[in-house]
Image (cartoon, rainbow, N blue to C red):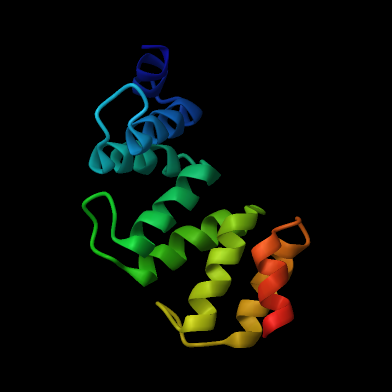
């Protein structure tokens, strides 16, 4: 109830939290579309975690959205530029695979280095393996 009230009044953190509640079906019926809608509202206010989650949803084609690597890159870039380690890693994956961008291993490694500097294990492994 508190999250819904705060989210409805425009609180970005509450909007993100409510999105996660619906995404994971915590005490509510799981619903990717409702989750996406809350993430969109919070992301529009600059919420980094919502930007990251939208990137994941575009990347995988979740929440009623078609898979769209360009949109995923846009969301990841917003979050990654704010220091979000997981999206820095994910952005590296897009560059490494040439998904939504021209394939660029050097750019992938650049993003992985940023994530690795924050202790992201998979990024550290990818740097070692490329």
Q: Quadrant of the N terminus?
A: top left
Residue 129 falls in which quadrant of the image? bottom right
Residue 44 location, x and y as percent? 41, 43
Residue positioned 65% across, 65% down in the render: 122
Residue 29 falls in which quadrant of the image? top left
| Residue closer to the observer: 113 or 83 | 113
Residue positioned 50% across, 87% down in the render: 103
Residue 67 location, x and y as percent? 28, 66
Residue positioned 58% across, 73% down in the render: 92
Horizontal relation, residue 125 to residue 65: left or right:
right
Residue 69 falls in which quadrant of the image? bottom left
Residue 24 location, x and y as percent? 37, 36
Q: How many marks?
A: 0
Q: Quadrant of the C terminus?
A: bottom right
Q: Is residue 65 above or below residue 13?
A: below
Q: Is residue 93 above or below residue 118?
A: below
Residue positioned 47% across, 87% down in the render: 102
Horizontal relation, residue 80 to residue 75: left or right:
right
């Amino acid at each position: 109830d508190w999250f819904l009230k705060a989210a409805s009044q425009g609180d970005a953190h509450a909007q993100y939290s409510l999105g996660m509640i619906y995404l994971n079906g915590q005490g509510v019926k799981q619903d990717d579309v409702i989750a996406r809608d809350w993430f969109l509202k919070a992301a529009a206010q600059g919420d980094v975690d919502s930007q990251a989650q939208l990137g994941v949803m575009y990347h995988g084609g979740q929440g009623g959205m078609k898979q769209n690597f360009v949109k995923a890159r846009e969301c990841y870039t917003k979050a990654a530029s704010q220091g979000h380690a997981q999206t820095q890693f994910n952005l590296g994956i897009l560059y490494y695979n040439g998904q939504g961008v021209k394939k660029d291993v050097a750019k992938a490694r650049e993003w992985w280095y940023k994530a690795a500097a924050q202790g992201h294990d998979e990024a550290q492994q990818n740097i070692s393996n490329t």
